[in-house]
Image (cartoon, helix red, strand yellow):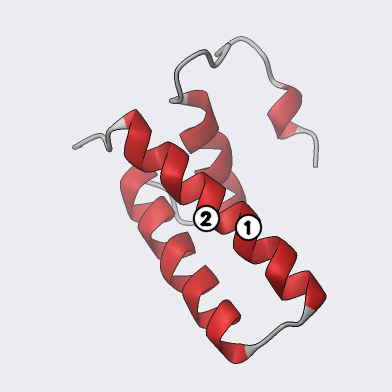
Amino acid sequence: MLMAHPAVLANLVEQYDTLRVLQAENGTEDVRNRMDDIAYTLCVSTGTRDIDVALIAARHRLPGANVDDDSLLAF
């Protein structure tokens, strides 16, 4: 499986987190559509099918991630 560059993953995670805040504040269709696009890209980039799993996988691949730290698994 091809692995996305950590800089790409960091950017995608940051965009998704920002859009999540915007969705909570005003919930426009444009924000929801962009979130769906980013979620799809994160899933493809991490080889997962669920956005929550994709976010965990992406964060574990970022520089400085402690792969033994499972604190991201607590929802």
Along the viewing direction, whichever of 17 and 4 lies nearer the viewer: 17
Q: Residue at x 45, y 38 (%)?
A: 10
- SS for callout 2: helix
**20 shown above or below 55:** below
Q: Are marks 1 and 2 in contact (CB under 8 Å)?
A: yes
Q: Where residue 71 appears, x then y in whole percent?
A: 75, 23
Q: Is residue 9 left or right of residue 13?
A: left
Q: How many marks?
A: 2
- SS for callout 1: helix
Q: Which residue is mark 2?
A: 15
Q: Is residue 62 left or right of residue 28?
A: left
Q: Is residue 21 left or right of residue 59?
A: right
Amino acid on which the number 2 mark rests in the picture: Gln
Q: Residue at x 61, y 50 (%)?
A: 52
Q: Residue at x 58, y 37 (%)?
A: 56
Q: Residue at x 47, y 36 (%)?
A: 58
Residue 38 is marked as none
Q: Where residue 16 appears, x then y in whole percent?
A: 56, 57
Amino acid on which the number 1 mark rests in the picture: Thr
**1 shown above or below 11:** above
Q: Where residue 23 appears, x then y in whole percent?
A: 71, 74
Q: Where residue 4 appears, x then y in whole percent?
A: 27, 38
Q: Which image quarter is the C terminus in?
A: top right
Residue 18 is marked as 1
Along the viewing direction, whichever of 29 and 48 lies nearer the viewer: 29
**3 shown above or below 71:** below
**74 shown above or below 38:** above
For label 1, count other residues whose C-alpha is less than 10 Å away and answer few (under 14), some (14-19) or many (20+): few
Q: Residue furthest bottom?
A: 29
For label 2, count other residues whose C-alpha is less than 10 Å away and answer few (under 14), some (14-19) or many (20+): some
